[in-house]
Image (cartoon, rainbow, N blue to C red):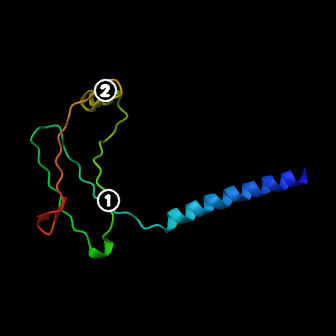
Amino acid sequence: MKVLRIYERFKNWRNIIVFMSCTLLMACSKHIETIRKPIDVSHSGRTVEINFELSKRQAGDYQFALLFATTDDYDEMKRRFKLFGNIDHDGVAIPISFRLVKDGNIFF
């Protein structure tokens, strides 16, 4: 019975150590800068250009994400489900072309 109590005590400490290690890893990681630019997609033929510079020091893996704003209003949510779709039906296709230009040349 004593062995079981020691194991339970060790198990609790192990969970605490794992939690603290994850917390320290998150606290020590560098802040990721994000570029946020709202885009109005309610009209067709809209063109948006976003210019930004990256330093050579910060060169590395970059991610691009297209996010849609959410709301708590039920009527607005129903309207957006008609446009973007949900699990029951498909939404409206919104064609998007993405170009990444580096030093005047199309990089991606």
Q: Which residue does the image show at 74% across and 54% down from the upper left?
A: 11
Q: Is residue 5 left or right of residue 82?
A: right
The reply to whether discs 2 and 1 touch (Cβ–Cβ < 8 Å) is no
Residue 31: give x, y in percent of width and height: 41, 65
Q: Which mark is residue 34?
A: 1
Q: Which residue does the image show at 11% across and 67% down from the upper left?
A: 104
Q: Is residue 72 left or right of residue 1?
A: left
Q: Residue 62 carries which label?
A: none
Q: Which of 24 and 73 is in front in this view?
A: 24
- In this view, the residue farthest toward the bottom is 57
Amino acid type of the residue that numbered disc 1 sits on in the rendered structure: Thr
Q: Quadrant of the C terminus?
A: bottom left
- Vertical relation: 68 (above or below) 61: above
Q: Which residue does the image show at 60% across and 63% down from the upper left?
A: 21
Residue 14: give x, y in percent of width and height: 70, 58
Q: In this view, does 11 lie to the left or right of 84?
A: right
- Looking at the rendered structure, the number of numbered marks drawn on it comes to 2
Give the class, few, some or many, for how many residues have Cα within 10 Å of label 2's Cα (few <14, many ≥20). few
- In this view, the residue farthest toward the top is 88
Amino acid type of the residue that numbered disc 2 sits on in the rendered structure: Lys
- Vertical relation: 52 (above or below) 81: below
Kindly identify which residue carries mark 2: 78
Residue 77: give x, y in percent of width and height: 32, 30
- Vertical relation: 27 (above or below) 80: below
- In this view, the residue farthest toward the left is 45
Q: Residue 94 occupies which quadrant of the picture?
A: top left
- In this view, the residue farthest toward the right is 1
Q: Is mark 1 on a helix, strand or loop?
A: loop
- From mark 2 to mark 1, how far is it between C-alphas? 30 Å
Q: Residue 42 occupies which quadrant of the picture?
A: top left
Q: Nearer the viewer, residue 33 or 4?
A: 4
Q: Earlier in the sequence, mark 2 or mark 1?
A: 1
